[in-house]
């Protein structure tokens, strides 16, 4: 399997603190990679460095073999990298369908064609499909701000898939989601992973969720990679138990 | 306005348009001037509503763009150019200057951005006043001609009112198209959550600059109509207070609502006239009315309507749920 994403020796300092301290890893085509570690270990900072929200102090990020370090988030998104945020980020005043159309529209045509073309950028069908896939049908026309937390979380994830991404980075998709909806979410993610051959990196604290979803797990502590391997290997690793999982 | 049935909306729209065409036929010169001013200020306020209401970029410089458009039109038409050419020049000029003014917005936001645009507003005023070789300085530019449209002279108030109204109609359609397009959605995304918008591929830099440039261009169009409307311009009408007036129109009407500027401009232009019978008190009453409105509804007049519609929708939805529930219970 070839690597979709190659991260080499990424460092990010904030003043005297190194939040990410020389992290290297790769993400293989079609896999679901879990990223776990205690709060403040640098997971989200690493995400932000990969995705252009932050510029790494040093190191390199390659997407399909092409260096993309320092590209802006919107440029990376157009190259097929999508994400969700730790805190819920939907557009509350837009309807569920409008949120999804927005999430896909910048991948259609160019600025000029989006101005003179159809107001839905030709995405109503695609948005409806996504709505059906995430079982949000009855809420399609509702303003996203009126949905329950769990439903917004589903919408948030659905938005990340609208542009047909190659690589999706999900930052705590399970946080605050009730168990029923969580198994729904997991099932949907696995289905997209298989059907669309999308590659995922998932930050998550819910161990059960991570261990059952991911093919490999990377553990971070204090800005460094502590362990990387299959879920069962990682679970038994003494250093991981010491730093994160507890006895 | 989404709560109204579509035929009702269309009927209401046709009635308002017909009234705007027919009723002013009986107006005197002054009434027509005020109404023309309403149309012109609505265009400028629509521009600011785009920049501020939809895209969320604070600007205290919209009055300066009205000035830029007005001077462009005044200078060109007094040198023999036709008004449509002057309007085109005003659009290009204010679009370009607006684009440049957008750059600070890529670095600073909210009240910091307000200060940057305020400084620009002052700068523009100083250029209008001090560069007399171009603008006539404090003496301004007089004898600004009104155009012949399809061979019809618009010297009289009524024909020129129709020029303003027609321009407003064209601008309204263009803005309607824009906000319904993916651009409009991207502007809203820029206002609500630029970080998330970026991660969805929205080029926030380009859309920010566009929001400033297009909003400013509409200010320029308004100015290019204002010059032949008053037929005399000097720097004073385009100072900071015009920018503040336009800001008030947008906020009072309802920022981010399509019809906000129409209502806001109506209140800002017409209400002081209606309150004139109170003589010395009219400006005070006007100020108090605006304060009370904003305390009652910070989202402006259309915000009140929007909340009412939302409440009605919620009520209807819970009624539907109740019906569904009772059906389920009887079925069991």
Image (cartoon, coloured by chain):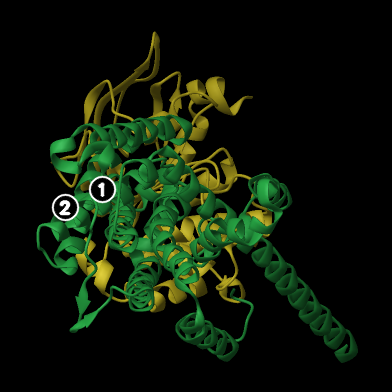
Chain colours: A yellow, B green
Q: Position of residue B112 (x, y in %)?
A: 43, 29
Q: Real-space Cα distance between discs 2 and 1?
A: 11 Å
Residue B47 in view here: yes
- Image mark for residue B22: none
Query: In the figure, B186 relative to A95: above or below?
Result: above
Disc 2 target residue = B75
Which residue is at 56% across, 87% downward?
B6
Query: In the figure, B166 relative to A103: above or below?
Result: below
Q: Position of residue B33 (x, y in %)?
A: 43, 66
- Image mark for residue B68: 1
Instruction: State the residue in front, A72 or B191.
Output: B191
Q: Residues within 10 Å of mark 1 (few under 14, many from 20)?
A: many
Q: Earlier in the sequence, mark 2 or mark 1?
A: 1
Give the quarter of the image for residue B271.
bottom right
Position of B328 with respect to B46 (left or right) is: right
Q: Secondary structure at mark 1?
A: helix
Which residue is at 72% across, 47% downward?
B295
The quarter in which the C terminus of chain A is drawn is top right
Q: Position of residue B46 (x, y in %)?
A: 42, 60
Count of marks, rendered view: 2
Q: Secondary structure at mark 2?
A: helix
Residue A1 in view here: no
Which residue is at 73% across, 51% downward?
B296
Q: Position of residue B4 (x, y in %)?
A: 63, 81
Q: Residues within 10 Å of mark 2 (few under 14, many from 20)?
A: some
Give the quarter of the image for residue B136.
top left
């Amino acid at each position: 399997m070839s690597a979709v994403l190659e991260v080499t020796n990424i460092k990010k300092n904030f003043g005297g603190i190194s939040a990410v301290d020389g992290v290297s890893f790769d993400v293989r085509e079609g896999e679901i990679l879990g990223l776990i570690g205690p709060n403040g270990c640098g997971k989200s900072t690493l995400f932000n460095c990969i995705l252009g929200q932050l510029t790494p102090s040093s190191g390199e990020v390659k997407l399909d073999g092409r260096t993309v370090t320092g590209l802006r988030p919107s440029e990376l998104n157009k190259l097929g990298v999508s994400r969700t945020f730790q805190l819920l980020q939907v557009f509350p005043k837009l309807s569920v369908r409008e949120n999804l159309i927005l999430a896909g529209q910048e991948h259609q045509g160019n600025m000029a064609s989006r101005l003179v073309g159809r107001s839905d950028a030709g995405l109503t069908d695609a948005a409806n499909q996504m709505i059906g896939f995430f079982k949000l049908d009855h809420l399609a026309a509702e303003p996203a701000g009126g949905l329950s937390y769990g439903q917004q979380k589903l919408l948030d994830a659905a938005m990340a898939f609208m542009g047909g991404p190659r690589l999706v980075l999900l930052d705590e998709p399970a946080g605050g989601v009730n168990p029923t909806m969580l198994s729904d979410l997991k099932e949907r993610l696995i289905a997209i992973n298989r059907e669309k051959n999308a590659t995922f990196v998932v930050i998550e604290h819910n161990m059960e969720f991570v261990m059952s979803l991911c093919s490999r797990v990377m553990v971070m502590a204090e800005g460094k990679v502590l362990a990387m391997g299959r879920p069962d290997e990682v679970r038994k690793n003494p250093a991981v138990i010491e730093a994160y999982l507890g006895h | 306005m989404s709560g109204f049935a579509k035929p009702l909306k269309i009927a209401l729209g046709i009635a308002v348009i017909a009234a705007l065409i027919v009723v002013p036929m009986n107006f005197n010169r002054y009434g027509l001037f005020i109404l023309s001013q309403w149309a012109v200020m609505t265009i400028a306020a629509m521009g600011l509503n785009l920049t501020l209401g939809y895209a969320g970029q604070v600007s205290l410089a919209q009055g300066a763009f009205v000035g830029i458009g007005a001077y462009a039109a005044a200078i060109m038409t007094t040198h023999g150019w036709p008004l449509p050419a002057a309007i085109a020049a005003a659009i290009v000029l204010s679009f370009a200057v607006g684009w440049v003014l957008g750059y600070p917005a890529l670095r600073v936001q909210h009240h910091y951005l307000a200060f940057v645009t305020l400084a620009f507003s002052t700068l523009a005023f100083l250029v209008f006043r001090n560069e007399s070789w171009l603008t006539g300085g404090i003496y301004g530019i007089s004898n600004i001609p009104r155009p012949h449209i399809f061979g019809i002279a618009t010297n009289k108030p009524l024909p020129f009112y129709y020029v303003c109204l027609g321009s407003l109609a064209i601008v309204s359609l263009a803005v309607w198209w824009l906000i319904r397009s993916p651009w409009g959605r991207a502007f809203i995304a820029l206002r609500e959550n630029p970080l998330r918008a970026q991660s969805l591929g929205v080029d926030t830099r380009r859309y920010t600059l566009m929001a400033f440039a297009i909003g400013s261009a509409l200010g320029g169009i308004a100015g290019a109509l204002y010059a032949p409307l008053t037929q005399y311009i000097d720097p004073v009408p385009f100072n900071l207070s015009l920018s503040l007036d336009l800001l008030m129109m947008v906020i009072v009407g309802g920022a981010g609502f399509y019809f906000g500027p129409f209502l806001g401009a109506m209140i800002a232009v017409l209400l002081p006239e209606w309150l004139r019978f109170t003589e010395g008190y009219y400006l005070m009453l006007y100020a108090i009315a605006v304060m009370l409105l904003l305390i009652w509804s910070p989202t402006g007049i259309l915000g009140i309507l929007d909340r009412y519609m939302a409440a009605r929708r919620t009520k209807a939805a819970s009624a539907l749920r109740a019906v569904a529930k009772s059906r389920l219970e009887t079925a069991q």
